[in-house]
Image: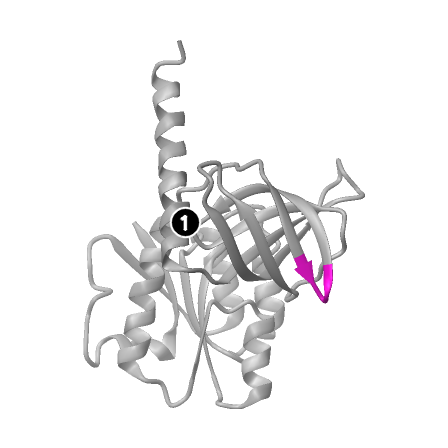
Amino acid sequence: MKKVLIANDLKRLYTEKDRFLDRAHIKVFTADTNDEVLKIYREEKADLIVTKLDMPGIKSEELFDAIKQRKELQEVLTIIICKDTPAHRERCRQCGATVVLTMPVDIALLHSKVQQLLNMAARQSYRVALTVAVEGKSKNRSFLYRTENISATGVLVKAEDVLSHGDRISLSFFLPDGTHVTAHGDVARVMKQATAPDACLYGIRFTDLDPSVQSAIEAFIKKESERKHAYALNPG
């Protein structure tokens, strides 16, 4: 079951041309304010949020900062609709939007992005630990760290280097099968650890990943998941 949380005044956009959300495996929630978005998200853990910048209630930046405080490794995917200005687009980026669309909304494009992200959410459930060194570069500084977790949409890494939410990172590492991964990403989450005060966990969302590399990551994750499942059934 995929859960989609939509700003109430955007819901009409899903009935004008297509009713693809009216399916048994998709459950839709609506909210009139950012406070309701946060409340429903915390209760239901939506896979996708479709909303507008500056909904009534708490500021959008506060909303998404609160969402990012959750301990789950899986990031919520978001589509944020805003005015077509550089300032508003930058605010959406600071909110960690997966997709930014501007008004007036292209309904066909919106539908396409929703379907694309729902498929991505399905892939995100396949996550495994990956112990490889990753060379990163941020603000013209190079550093080395280890991945804690990987998905087709990003990596969770541990580092003593200080990174900030929104920092743009260049990544280079190898999968166990030898596949060389080079990508760019944004720091989407920063999590301090009580057990390791000198290090932080950083959730890095890929912003451009070659389709062949994405397929290789998905194949690796699927193989590891199947191996762990087989071991759980037959540990001997």
Residue placed most toward the observer, 144 or 21: 144
The quarter of the image holding the C terminus is top left
Q: Residues within 10 Å of mark 1 (few under 14, many from 20)?
A: many
- Label 1 sits on residue: 124
- Image position of 119 with respect to 196: above or below: below
Q: Residue at x 48, y 65 (%)?
A: 37
Question: Residue 220 appears at what percent x and percent y?
Answer: 40, 39
Furthest residue toward top? 236
Q: Residue at x 55, y 67 (%)?
A: 96
Furthest residue toward right? 198
Relative to 88, 20 lies left or right: left
Q: Residue at x 36, y 54 (%)?
A: 212
Q: Secondary structure at mark 1?
A: helix
Question: Residue 60 appears at what percent x and percent y?
Answer: 57, 73
Q: Quadrant of residue 46?
A: bottom left
Query: Which span of residues is magenta-colored?
Result: 137-141
Q: Residue at x 58, y 47 (%)?
A: 156
Question: Residue 85 appears at what percent x and percent y?
Answer: 53, 90
The answer to whether residue 44 is magenta is no
Amino acid type of the residue tagged 1 in the rendering: Gln
Q: How was the colour assigned to the protein in this rendering?
A: one colour
Question: Residue 170 appears at what percent x and percent y?
Answer: 60, 60
